[in-house]
Image (spheres, rainbow, N blue to C red):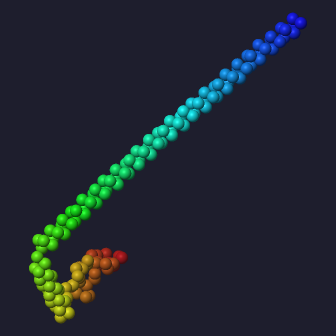
């Protein structure tokens, strides 16, 4: 019977040791799991902060653009009011009419044969028999022409 008690105590001790080892190995994995969860939570918080910063940036940009548009509209209205108040429309219309008359006169001169030629991008030949600059023998002496 003492052997039976000793065997039971030994089995109990072996069971406790095995239980402790399994418990510690589970503790290590749960510790890793807790660390991973903490990292995930930190990343979520960082992502949330980033989203808030982006949202704040675009809201401020929209506000500044709205102010810019309002200022531009104010300047445009100021210029239009100044032009209406300061510009004498009668003089402007008269000057426009004179410009139209000048254009008509220029058109009639062009029809009469006073047509101005556009500038050329090459030098004209003095004589129709003369070789042009694109001719194969241009600039060569008679000897060089014979060899070619």
> Does residue 112 sit above or below 31 in this rendering?
below
Give how far across and how far down residue 132 sits, in percent: 28, 81
> Does residue 5 sit above or below 126 in this rendering?
above
User: Residue at point 20% right, 93% down?
Assistant: 111
Q: Nearer the viewer, residue 18 or 70?
A: 70
User: Residue at point 21% right, 84% down?
Assistant: 117
**Figure disc tally:** 0
Give how far across and how far down residue 75 sits, in percent: 21, 63
Q: Nearer the viewer, residue 131 or 115?
A: 115
User: Residue at point 25% right, 88% down?
Assistant: 128
Residue 23 placement, left or right of 89: right
Q: Nearer the viewer, residue 6 or 102?
A: 6
Residue 54 placement, left or right of 23: left
Give how far across and how far down residue 140 sits, in percent: 28, 76
The C terminus sits in image quarter: bottom left
> Does residue 85 sit above or below 96 in this rendering?
above
Give how far across and how far down residue 134 sits, in percent: 31, 78
Q: Quadrant of residue 38?
A: top right
Residue 138 placement, left or right of 55: left
């Amino acid at each position: 019977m003492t052997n039976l008690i000793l065997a039971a105590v030994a089995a109990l001790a072996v069971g406790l040791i095995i239980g402790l080892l399994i418990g510690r190995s589970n503790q290590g994995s749960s510790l890793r799991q807790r660390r991973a969860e903490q990292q995930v939570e930190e990343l979520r918080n960082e992502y949330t902060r980033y989203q808030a910063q982006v949202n704040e940036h675009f809201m401020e940009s929209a506000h500044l653009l709205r102010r810019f548009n309002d200022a531009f509209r104010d300047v445009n209205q100021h210029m239009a009011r100044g032009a209406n108040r300061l510009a004498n429309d009668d003089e402007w219309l008269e000057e426009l009419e004179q410009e139209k008359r000048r254009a008509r006169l220029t058109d009639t001169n062009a029809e009469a044969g006073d047509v101005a030629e556009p500038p050329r991008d090459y030098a004209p030949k003095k004589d129709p028999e003369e070789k042009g600059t694109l001719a194969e023998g241009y600039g060569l002496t008679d000897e060089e022409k014979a060899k070619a």
